[in-house]
Amino acid sequence: MRFYGQRVALAILLLLAVSMLTFGALNVLGDPLFNVLGPVAGDVNNPDSIKMIEAAKREFSLDRPLPVRYAIWLSDFVRGDFGVTFSSTGQPPVSGVISERLPRTFTLVAMAQLIAVFVSIPWALITASRAGKISDRISTLNAFFLLAMPNFALAVILKFVFSIKLGWTPLTYVGDDPLGSRLFQMLLPALTIGLPVAAVYQRLLRTDIITTLQQDFILLARTKGLSRSRILIAHALRPSLFSFVTVVGLNTGALIGGSIVAETVFRIPGIGSTLVESVLRNDFPVVLAIVMIVASSFVIINLFVDFAYTLIDPRVRK
Amino acid sequence: MTAEKITSGSDDQGAKKKLGIGFWLCVFWLTIMACVALFIPFLPLKSPTSNFVDATQGRPPYAPSWTHWFGTDKDARDVFSRTLHGARISLTVGFTAITAGFVVGGTIGVISGYFRGWLDRISSFVFVVLLSFPSLVLAILLTSLIERSLLTVSLVLGLLSIAPVGRLARAATMQYADREFVLAARQIGSKDHQIILKEILPNVAIPMSSLALLGMAVAVVAEGGLAFLGLSVEKGITWGGLIQLGSDSSRTLEDAPWISFFPILMLFLTVLSLNFAGDRLRAFFDVKEAAL
Amino acid sequence: MSSHVTDESSTEPLIETVGLRTHFITPRGIARAVDGVTVQIRRGQSLGVVGESGSGKTVLSRSMMGLLPRNGVIREGSIRYGGIEIQHRSPKQMRRVWGPEMAMVFQDPMTSLNPVMKVGKQVTESLQLHLGMSSSEAMAVAEKVFRDVGIPEAARRLNQFPHELSGGMRQRVMIAIALACGPNMLFADEPTTALDVTVQAQILDLLSAQIKDRHMSMLLVTHNLGVVAGYTDEIAVMYGGKVVERAPTKALFSNVKMPYTEALLQSIPRLSHASHSRLAVIPGRPPDLVDPPAGCRFAPRCAYARDLCRREEPELIQAESPDHTFACHFPVGSPEYHERREELSRMPAPLLGRP
């Protein structure tokens, strides 16, 4: 129990540090006042402007020192109040924007991860059992090529081939479509993110399976007259999954990063594309909220990965 | 006798001790790219910003031809020239970023790994914090707040590589710090900084340098991603930026795929070369993959 | 190949090899791990194969069962099981035999059992595959086999993992796995080497009892002559990839012929020795399998070797009965042997070290 408690405490500490860093960076390196009012913020000679400046300062607590502002923000944040977006007229609350768009990104990342895992496992099993043969070498080369293609480039290529030339998927994401259609529209972006990651997983898993296949208990399994595929799936796979599980968990961060690109290329309104838009608009509350959400997910997932170890390896269970 | 360990085609073993022709092909390509990046002002290229509208061909974009090897974009700018100019920024940023990252991250890593104690705990915590952001998110965050010049963008990406590089350097240092030859050096009275410079650094530098190429590949891809999103060097021509311009609207992508595809090709070949050569070097020096 | 072999009363050997050679292609050359071995084992009979590491005994057992990889291995000679040639059968064909006809017990039960699979499942797996049992039928049989091999609280143990069991119990599990489908031929490859001394005897007793009860044949590979002494009908001594002496157990101990065997016998520590007696050792190292010495392979280390030994390889000849064969030019008891012994006893430090 102590083990779990320590890890959770560390995770919370981490998130606080992340939030302080981000909040500090945004407020010190940027100029919140400018973002709210635009050029008016610098117009200190105009009495009307000054009134607006004062009003803005009060509304957004910009006249208080930085640590106080941080504390205010933090207490709001944990209660779910992410503030209002800065520079849209009508100023919808940030939480509204996020709750609308987060599920899409979540779906996209989940799909990508599922694709990556379910592609990499059979791929690794097959290439491990044929290690060194031609098919294995070709596969390694393919994986290399896949990994050398940055995901935005891959997205453009896939869009060109499947949406434009073949017309199999629509060009833009339509949010009003029924669920099935929406999921289908996410397939191509999910592939964009998921396939390169599958190559990473496959590479690692293949090595681990090959190592496992050298073990004595595999020889014993052979003497029982089991077929090769049964030995691979029932005996070799599970003991090889330890590093795999860790990498899958840790890679979720890369997938989230990839979703930013995929959402931009395929025009899906999720938090990834929103992040980019808000950043270009200097919309701090949105940026801050998204960064915190992303970092939190990352930290929480890493926590789960640590705990998941005990599930896979019965030797660690106590 | 473990007869069953003699299997056919043990894949990694044969390739380990020589770099192979693939490696040298990659080095060749990278050298060409480096020359392009360095000597662009002296190359007989068309201007990357001028418009070469040709009434006889109708409206731009023009497909690849003898006059425009990579074709032109919607504003009739020469894609070939622009792509080569893009190499300049993308490679420079990649190189500067990884160099800064190695220097700073490596130093911090070696020092923490050697001295341990509170210094190590602080730097490890900082590393973990930096690594709790997906790197693209952090890159986006930081580049949005600054004036984006060649130097600043490189430094941001360099900052991002400090944590991974630092962790590696630290792990490598800790491996060596306990070895006999270090203890022996201390016995004969060498001071810490001498030990670090003479005993530890040479041993750590070898595996680290073989990772430099891989690190640069990551930096180039990161810069490409930022450029694609519009967050790289302001007003600079970058591969990511070119790709974005060519794919921004589906019409452009459909009618004139060459605008994006040639930069994609260049980027792909460069990253592939960096990855492949880096991987060969890593196998050559036998660095454990788990360390990455 | 049918799964029912020769009838119980047949005097034909259950398994035999004729001139078996197993050579490995290595970077240094061809390693002749098994270099012309001819043995027979009848039903219900057990053969102990004794030798140092590198003698080829493990390769012999694996060759006979057909477990070696296809690549990098040269196979010659014949292996017959139930009268049928199996030397060149594909793994696919052999898979039907492994389990119901032949099984192997390995040396280290910790690494030979799947660490993440419950031990019960490791038994029921073959039962379900070869005998077509349902999972509940298989579990019942597995529980019975666990009890047969002396695992207490069998039902509970079925659901445990290997790391939850002691070394001796793990080896019992391995034996249970081997016996589950009722094979006729058991290969035991150093089954007790990794165990505590106290547990070794128990496991050997267990094997012995099971062999008798099930009328099985066994090939027991070990480097320890003391192990085979009470547990096998016949013993074959291997050196440098060849069988150098073979006899019924009693005859081997009472009428040893080959000096190497004699040296092995003398190197067994006995309770009757004074404490702190120096252990007898055989000086030198096993021969290089890629480039073995000319003549008798043991000659470089043999105290009784003469020029002939280094020139000509001795053939296997009969001793006092057809069951007892050995390969030596100047065996134990020959005039040359006694002559050399005289010389040695007059030397200050005897080669076969006793205080």
Image (cartoon, coloured by chain):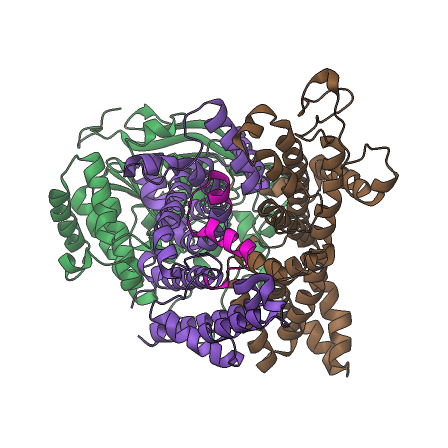
Chain colours: A purple, B brown, C green
Front-most of residues C85 and A296: A296
Identified at 35% across, 47% down, the residue is A107
What segment is highlighted magenta in the picture?
A261-285
x and y percent of residue C257 in the render?
A: 45, 47
Residue at 60%, 27% (x, y): give it: B257
Q: Main secondary structure of the magenta part?
A: helix
Check the picture and name the quadrant holding the C terminus of chain B.
Answer: bottom right
Whether residue A257 can be seen here: yes
Residue sitting at 17 percent across and 32 percent down? C8
> Does residue A297 belong to the magenta stretch?
no
* Above-or-below relation of C341 to C235: below
State the image quarter where residue A227 is shown. Answer: top left
Q: Position of residue C32 (x, y in %)?
A: 54, 37
Q: Position of residue C348 (x, y in %)?
A: 62, 68
Name of the residue lying farthest toward the top = B56
Give the image location of residue B39, x and y in percent. Answer: 85, 42
Asked whether residue C319 appears in the rendered view, the answer is: no
**Which of C270 and A175 lies nearest the eye of the viewer?**
A175
On screen, residue A226 versus residue A215, left or right, reads: left
Q: Is residue C279 above or below residue A132?
A: below
Q: In the image, is residue A273 part of the stretch drawn in magenta?
A: yes
Which image quarter: residue A308? bottom left
